[in-house]
Image: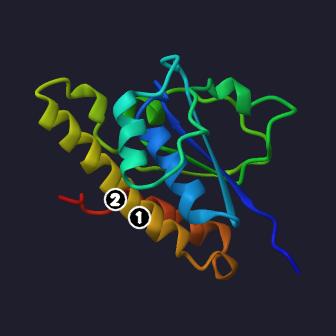
Amino acid sequence: MTRKAAHILILCTGNSARSILAEGLINHFGAPDFVAYSAGSQPKGEPHPHALNTLEKHKIDTGFARTKSWDEFAGADAPALDYIITVCDNAAGETCPIWPGKPTTAHWGIPDPADVTAPQTAVEAAFDLAYAQLHARISRFLALPFDQLDPTALKQEMMAIGQMEEVA
């Protein structure tokens, strides 16, 4: 019997850096069991070039990358969501749309690498750090024994992942 892929929405305010990195990571390492999307409450209009460069550096396809409003995922024709993860403090504190199906939610705050603008080495280091932090959390998430966890335990595990010590 084939298990249906779980759908994950990664939210951030601008949907240009952290959420794009997470979408790429989950779709790369979690396929075919997981399908990720990313969106923002106030999308920037295009992915941050350094987010794309960082994914490409790790051999992750960026053909998926576009900024999207979270409204795309709140409508009747949107994919059914199993999980929603916020990766920035702003998105975690905003009033989100009502998500059909009551997906399991968690907050995994990651410092915004797009806030670093110079010098170039510092920008690259900020994106590398965000990638490493997201990779560590996503790896732990993908390794969870989903079929052995009840909804409360799963939510606790997802929240604990958000509290992981930062990768240096």
The image's mark for residue 100 is none
- Three-letter code, disc 1: Ala
- Tag 1's secondary structure? helix
Distance from Cα at disc 1 to Cα at disc 2? 5 Å
Quadrant showing the N terminus? bottom right
Q: Position of residue 34 (x, y in %)?
A: 67, 60
**Residue 74 locus on image (x, y percent):** 74, 31
As drawn, 116 above or below 56: above
Drawn side of residue 43 relative to residue 77, left or right: left
Residue at x-position 69% and y-position 67%: 33
Name the side, left or right, on which 121 lies relative to 149. left
Q: Amino acid at mark 2?
A: Gln
Crowd rating for badge 2 (residues with CA inside 10 Å; few <14, some 14–19, many 20+): few
Residue 109 appears in view: no
Q: Residue at x 28, y 41 (%)?
A: 127
* Mark seen at residue 160: 1
> In which image quadrant can residue 53 be found?
top left
Q: In this figure, what is the number of numbered marks?
A: 2
Which residue is the site of mark 2?
Answer: 163
